[in-house]
Amino acid sequence: MNKFCTGRKQWDSQHLSKNMKPKFHHSNKEHLFKLAFSNGISGRGTLGYSRWSSRPLPTLLTGGETEVLQRPGFFDYEESSSPQVADWYMNFANNEIFSAWATSLLAQDELQVAEHPALIGMRIEAMKEGISLWSVEDGVPTPILITGVERRLSIDTSPNEGAGRPHGIYGNYFRNASESQITSATTVITPPTKSNILAIEAPAYGSGRYTSNTITFILNTAYSGFSAVSDESRLSLNASTVRIHSGFWGCGAYGGNRVLMLILQMVAARLAGIDQIIFHTGDGSGSLPFRESYEIFRRIPRENLSVNQVIDLVAGYHFEWGESDGN
């Protein structure tokens, strides 16, 4: 086992899906669950879990040149046609992963679980077996990776006046949506595809200017998670190329600064040797912060620069915390 990997477990996907009997706190979540298995249970392969320790940041800005891309819209969980390529999708985690699956909320974490309902079964089994679900412990990041989880639904949460969903069904709007609105926004994926997920938590609810200590913590969290992804891709997926799909991590309910959070993910991806990081920027409002963050990232010297100097450089832009979006 890799020295940074602190726990590992696998479950049979069909057994997991067949035997879970979740109790939902809201009928709309139960409706999505029923839709997910409306074509029966045909689980295949294994769902893998691993938990990783925090890693010290490198001294120097080293690593290969990471390709940075923008993709409008939200996660599509497209599977690579090459077995040599490992695609990973971020879970913008709470410190206890997948903990709000049964509630009336449908923000990024809950949406991912609804589309990948085996995550509910994994969480239930992990709790029974005493397997840790904490992505942060004692103030230190402990990234959690999930491999091979089936995606059974594609849910369009965006506003669609013509389809009778003028506000969409994202976040708190999901609570008051009708079953017909939810059904019209949902596509059952047959056969299910498979996804790999990285769960790390961003700092939350800050105010004023970001300190160097907070910037360092964010960079360390992303670097620890991205490095775990790199290691796991080669250990269990036999991949030679690693791609991470992310977005405005920590910038919704947690109120993070969109530009800063993208810059630090770009730096972390380079430090971890990730081949490509793809930012899914949602609606049109996401393009401007992406362009701004990428321009700043490009201006960071690539040679003879320490990581501490990078942190000081980023802190020198005096980024301010934003506000929670309430979701």
Image: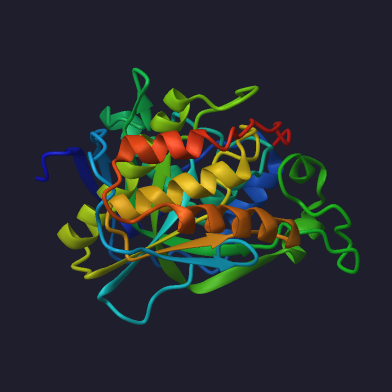
Relative side of 182 to 294, left or right: right
Q: Residue at x 42, y 24 (%)?
A: 213
Q: Residue furthest bottom?
A: 81
Q: Residue at x 26, y 31 (%)?
A: 129
Q: Residue furthest top?
A: 138
Q: Dividing the image into 4 quarters, which one contains the C terminus?
A: top right
Residue 87, above or below 27: below
Q: Residue at x 65, y 33 (%)?
A: 255
Relative side of 231 to 70, left or right: left
Nearest the camera: 269 or 301?
301
Nearest the camera: 166 or 120?
166
Quadrant of res 242: bottom left
Q: Is residue 83 visible?
A: yes
How far across and down, in percent of the image, does residue 70 sit? 56, 66
Relative side of 307 to 56, left or right: right
How far across and down, in percent of the image, does residue 38 sit? 58, 64
How far across and down, in percent of the image, does residue 269 sit? 36, 53
Q: Residue at x 61, y 24 (%)?
A: 205
